[in-house]
Image (cartoon, rainbow, N blue to C red):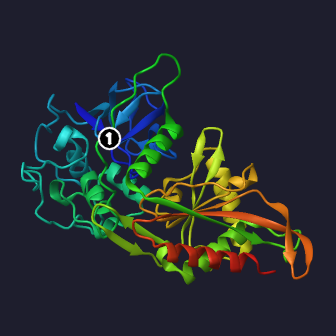
Amino acid sequence: MTIFNLPDLGEGLAEAEIVRWHVNVGDAVIVDQPMLAVETAKAIVEVPVPFSGVVKALHGQPGDIVETGAPLIELESKRSTTDAGTVVGNVPTSDEELIESAYAGGRGNNGHSAHSANGTNGANANNGITPHSANGQLRAAPAARSLARKLNIDLTQLTGSGPGGVIIVDDVIAHSNAPSNKPSAPTPTAARPQATPFTGGEQLRGLRRAMAQSMTLAHDNVANCTIFDDADLHRWHESKDFTPRLLRAIAAACQAEPALNAWFDGATQIRRELPEINVGMAVDTPHGLIVPIIRDVGSRSASQLRGEIDRLKRAARDRSIAPEDLRDATFMLTNFGMMAGRYATPVVLPPTVAILGSGRLSRDVVAVNDRVEAHLRMPLSLTFDHRCVTGGEAARFLAAVLRDLEKDN
């Protein structure tokens, strides 16, 4: 019998909620067929069957919250196994057998490698063997392949630590968590005393639970500071598409003041300015707030930006958005003014260092030389992390946004 645990799906959280099972106890299953859907911080992710066999037990029901590394499913391999999950008979020789043995011989029998107390690979380590078979084909456990696809990781760059050099889930996770590939998360502060429990209400789940965790992280680790101003849109044509123009203005401001297109790790005090401008845009849905990423904003035309905005909004609202569309924002945007409100104090989510909020448009009375005119204006609220961004940098950034928005093209 082999137990498969919930893998780290790359969403930065320690848990996921079971949405639905695609298999039942007694089913015969094959590698990579849909096994279950889980909801992470922002998206619903399909987890595939790790290897062929028969389902013996399911751990958890729809609605249950499962921690990363906790048991998900028990499978009996198509080959005879002992109760401990050790393969009976000869040492496996084919690629398929090597891949399946990566599950049978590891930590918790979940497709991870065994490790000794000092953190080095144990008996199943391959001491750096290249993960290719004699015919040159790359060998990787199905769950490792699936996770690598979700994290956009090239498996050919990894060294397998499973039996015979097979790439396993641990290898993918180790690569994705390497400092050169991903900024480390700020160290959380000590937990605060809890308020007196009350009766009634409901447990936060899904997106609202993720929001609670993200806002707690931000409150505990970011020094938020907000500055406000208004962009005069008097020169605009009536048919102007607002969101692409906002994105263009953000790109112009990031080029003028790169300090706000950056990541900051408060634990290590490392700030990294980023060359590509990837804007996370908040989308309100019936389930909660989702923040898809519009990538490489500075090199896209207005029509390209509009097409990407529409695609991501549709995917966010029908919960079909891919995990890769939710990662690695370098700057954040919230268009709360589309509903109500002129100004706000948006919250910076680490590792980003700034977020721009656009408020409700209005026609304001302004003085122009010696006369009074009514101009269309857009209220703007720029929140920045004052631990690593100076007031001067933030003011220069907002000034650049204003200059670009106030152009007539």
290 vs 249: above or below: above
Quarter of the image with the C terminus is: bottom right
Is 173 situated left or right of 62 in this image?
left
**Amino acid type at mark 1:** Thr
**Residue under the point 38% across and 41% down:** 49
**Residue under the point 75% across and 49% down:** 339
Q: Percent from the top left, x then y, of residue 57?
A: 33, 25
**Residue under the point 87% across and 79% down:** 368
Q: Furthest-top residue in view?
A: 199
Determine if residue 298 is in view: no
Provide the residue designation for mark 1. Answer: 68
**Quarter of the image where one finds residue 263:** bottom left
370 and 99: which is toward the camera: 370
78 vs 155: above or below: above
Is 233 situated left or right of 264 in this image?
right
56 vs 284: above or below: above
Determine if residue 91 is in view: yes
**Residue under the point 46% across and 38% down:** 38
Q: Percent from the top left, x then y, of residue 167?
A: 25, 58
Look at the numbered disc 1 and give the secondary structure of its residue: loop
